[in-house]
Image (cartoon, rainbow, N blue to C red):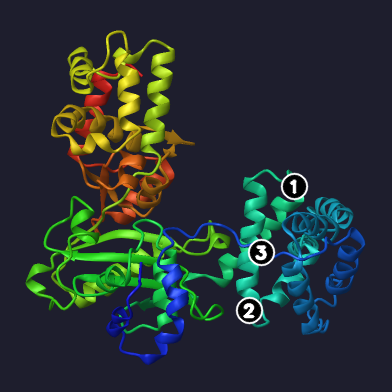
């Protein structure tokens, strides 16, 4: 993709030459979501695991000496890290199982203290509080000490982030059902949430003058709209664009979450105008043409930080930054993909056909139009034709098919976003993210992403989640506490059409 040396003339620093091969490869990657597993030529036996753990996981000091015990040597942490990195994937599972199971909480002592706490309920408050504190200390897993000490050595925090990514993969793949592994995950998440609290994060604006290594990672981690080449990357950090990232002192040069923003006159209704139809990279910004900030991509770069709140804080910090730079700016909105809509729709159509309820999704007239537009052969159920149609992106090139499908897909998509729930909250993860932040489900946009990926994921539809700054706190509270979704008249109108046409 980057084949000619003239592209490097864009860079002002000669130090980027030595990184060309690395960046060239990274720009070809659309999503970096896979895990990197270290391998070793020989499998490690149980005895080897027991020996290293017995040596590096120190006993939990007694309650009385908890603040007086000297820290273990740094070599313990380094040995643990080196040993773990040398293991094959299968051995890592066994190693983490043994660590979490054999070096966790002393359950017998915890039970005894819990009984003692019950016995002290009629005693004075000071005695109760002291027993509670002893019990709290006793509930500390023995391996937590090791994790804390690892965080203090060079590269230790990054190691623990990657370690938790491995634990999450074990849990999600059901490679282990061990409750000890889940407890290890909870301990790691709690520690990482403390270490990556918003007060310890640094907001950094990424520009074309940023270090080459950072630009490489920005392109490498872009998971929503893949970066195509150097020119594409330069435009995404150039005029009428902003790119921000949270970084952490313990992981220098490693962006944790990245937000791309387009500065526009109005709230954008399609992604092509943002990532495809660029002005020249040398354009000077005209402040009079900047009235809105469009958050068109947010990517978390560290799988091990899943569940640690970063993205919502990043958006809020960026809003403050932009308000400082453009005091007149009052429109803040996302332009978001709708991952999962197409697969949900395929499942809904399959279920409707199986149960003979296809007529409940579309009106009789709409089914006739689908049959005519798809030239369905006699006897072929229209629902099969529609399923086949939305499984490809070809129909987006046909004005006739787009006209027929627009009212159908728009109301189905509105219901998917607004009405489909998981535990009472929005089923769609992107919707759930923005609604938790207090945004309003503001506008569905037809043919907003006509790329093959956009067609495959969401039938080309995108959605704006609008951030009305005076309402975000109220909206967030209502959503989190009452599961109420703030939505515009357009969205509610489409939902009403779905409910009127469907009997689901």
Residue 239 image position (x, y, % from top left) = 19, 74
Q: Is residue 387 among the parts visible in the rendering?
A: yes
**Residue 201 in sight in this render:** no
Task: Give the residue number, with chain letter if any, for mark 2.
Answer: 155
Looking at marks 3 and 1 on the same chain, the residue that comes earlier in the sequence is marked by 3
* Other-residue count near label 3 (Cα within 10 Å), few / some / many at <14 / 14–19 / ≥20: many
Secondary structure under badge 3? helix
Q: Quadrant of residue 130?
A: bottom right
Contact (Cβ within 8 Å) of mark 3 with mark 2: no
SS for tag 1? helix
User: With 485 as the anchor, is 448 left or right in this view?
Assistant: left
The residue identified by callout 3 is 163
User: Horizontal and vertical percent for residue 72?
Assistant: 81, 81
Compared across the picture, whether 357 is left or right of 39 comes to left
**Residue sitting at x 44%, y 62%:** 29
| Cα–Cα span, label 3 and label 2 | 12 Å
Q: Quadrant of residue 91?
A: bottom right
Q: Name the front one of labels 3 and 1.
A: 3
Q: Residue at x 45, y 58 (%)?
A: 31
How many tags in the picture?
Answer: 3
Q: Which mark is residue 435?
A: none
Point out residue 159 in the picture as x, y percentages from the top left corner. Answer: 65, 71
Q: Earlier in the sequence, mark 3 or mark 2?
A: 2
| Residue identifier under label 1 | 179
* 378 shown above or below 113: above
Give 15 or 254, whichever is nearer the viewer.
15
Secondary structure of residue under mark 2 = loop
* Quarter of the view holding residue 136: bottom right
Instruction: Using the image, determine if residue 126 lies above or below residue 202.
Output: above
């Amino acid at each position: 993709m980057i084949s000619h040396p003239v592209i490097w003339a864009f860079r002002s620093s000669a130090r980027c030459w030595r990184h060309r091969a690395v960046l060239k490869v990274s720009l070809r990657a659309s999503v970096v979501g896979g895990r990197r597993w270290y391998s070793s030529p020989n499998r490690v036996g149980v005895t080897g695991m027991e020996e290293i753990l017995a040596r590096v996981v120190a006993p939990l000091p007694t309650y009385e000496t908890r603040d007086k015990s000297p820290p273990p040597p740094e070599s313990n942490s380094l040995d643990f890290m080196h040993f773990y990195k040398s293991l094959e994937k299968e051995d890592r599972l066994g190693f983490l199982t043994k660590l979490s199971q054999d070096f966790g909480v002393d359950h017998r002592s915890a039970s005894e203290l819990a009984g003692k706490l019950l016995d002290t309920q009629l005693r004075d408050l000071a005695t109760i509080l002291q027993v509670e504190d002893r019990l709290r200390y006793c509930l500390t897993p023995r391996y937590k000490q090791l994790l804390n000490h690892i965080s203090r050595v060079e590269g230790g925090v990054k190691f623990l982030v990657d370690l938790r990514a491995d634990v999450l993969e074990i849990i999600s793949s059901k490679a282990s059902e061990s409750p000890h592994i889940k407890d290890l995950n909870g301990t790691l998440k709690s520690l990482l949430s403390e270490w990556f609290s918003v007060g310890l994060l640094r907001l950094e604006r990424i520009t074309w003058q940023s270090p080459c290594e950072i630009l490489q990672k920005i392109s490498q981690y872009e998971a929503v709209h893949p970066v195509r080449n150097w020119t594409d990357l330069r435009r995404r950090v150039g005029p009428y664009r902003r790119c921000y990232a949270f970084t952490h002192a313990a992981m220098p040069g490693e962006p944790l979450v990245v937000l791309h923003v387009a500065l526009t006159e109005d709230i954008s209704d399609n992604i092509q105008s943002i990532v495809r139809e660029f002005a020249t990279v040398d354009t000077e910004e005209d402040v009079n043409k900047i009235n809105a900030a469009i958050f068109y991509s947010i990517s978390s770069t560290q799988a091990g930080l899943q569940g640690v709140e970063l993205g919502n804080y990043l958006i809020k910090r960026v809003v403050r930054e932009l308000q400082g730079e453009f005091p007149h700016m009052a429109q803040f909105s996302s332009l978001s993909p709708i991952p999962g809509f197409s697969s949900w729709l395929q499942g809904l159509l399959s279920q409707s056909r199986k149960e003979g309820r296809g007529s409940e999704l579309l009106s009789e007239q709409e089914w006739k139009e689908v049959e005519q537009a798809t030239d369905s052969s006699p006897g072929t159920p229209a629902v099969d034709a529609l399923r086949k149609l939305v499984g490809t992106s070809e129909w987006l090139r046909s004005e006739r098919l787009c006209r027929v499908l627009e009212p159908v897909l728009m109301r189905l998509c509105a219901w998917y976003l607004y009405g489909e729930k998981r535990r009472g909250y929005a089923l769609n993860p992107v919707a759930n993210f923005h609604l938790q932040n207090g945004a309003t489900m503001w506008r569905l946009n037809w043919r907003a992403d006509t790329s093959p990926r956009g067609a495959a994921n969401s039938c080309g539809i995108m959605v704006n989640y609008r951030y009305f700054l005076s309402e975000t706190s109220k909206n967030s509270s209502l959503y989190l506490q009452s599961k109420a979704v703030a939505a515009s008249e357009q969205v509610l109108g489409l939902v009403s059409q779905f409910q009127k046409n469907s009997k689901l």
